[in-house]
Image (cartoon, rainbow, N blue to C red):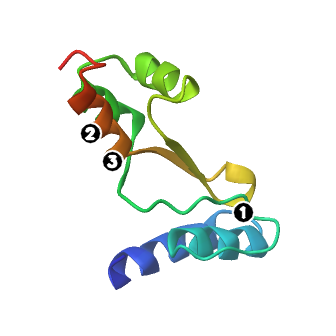
Amino acid sequence: MMQSTRTAVAAILRTDPSITREQAKAAMDALEGRTSAGLAVEAPTDRALTRRQAAEILGVTPRTVTIYARDGLIKAFRFGAKGKLASGYSAESVRALLERGKAVA
């Protein structure tokens, strides 16, 4: 992650009154691929896509992306304390699904 991105995210986390200092640290640790006590993190080994990005790549609706993740066709990520800070979908698993021909593309 670029230093400017790290600085911007840290500033946002510091200014949000609903996020505790511990949650902010856990979120930064998760973004850096580190784990903290009480943090439910699975650090992605590839780029995470938003639901909309995954839907565009696969040529399906965002709801269908959610269904694909639920059914285990693509891998979903959750970041932050209790997995509530951010989420995304594995670009690698989206590509693999596209190559297998399971989606309309």
In the displayed structure, 85 sits above or below 19; it is: above
- As drawn, the residue found furthest toward the right would be 38
Tags 3 and 2 touching, CB below 8 Å = yes
Label 1, secondary structure: give it: loop
The image quarter containing residue 45 is bottom left
Residue at image x 55%, y 22%? 71
Label 3, secondary structure: give it: helix
Residue that badge 2 annotates: 95
Residue that badge 1 annotates: 17
Q: Which one is in front in this view, the residue at disc 1 or the one at disc 2?
A: 2
Question: What x and y, as percent, mark residue 56?
Answer: 24, 28
Which amino acid, by three-letter code, is at mark 3? Glu
> Is 95 placed left or right of 86 in the picture?
left
Which amino acid, by three-letter code, is at mark 2? Arg
Residue at image x 73%, y 75%? 36
Q: Is residue 18 visible?
A: no
Question: What x and y, as percent, mark residue 98?
Answer: 25, 29
Residue at image x 30%, y 38%? 96
Residue at image x 68%, y 51%? 83
Number of residue marks: 3
Which amino acid, by three-letter code, is at mark 1? Pro
Question: What x and y, as percent, mark residue 23?
Answer: 73, 67
Tell me the crowding category of disc 3: few under 14, some 14 to 19, or many 20 or more residues within 10 angstroms, Cα based. some
Q: Which one is in front in this view, the residue at disc 1 or the one at disc 3?
A: 3
- As drawn, the residue found furthest toward the front would be 100
Which tag, 1 or 3, sits closer to the chain's start? 1
The CA span between labels 3 and 2 is: 5 Å
Label 2, secondary structure: give it: helix
In the displayed structure, 52 sits above or below 77; it is: above
Residue that badge 3 annotates: 92
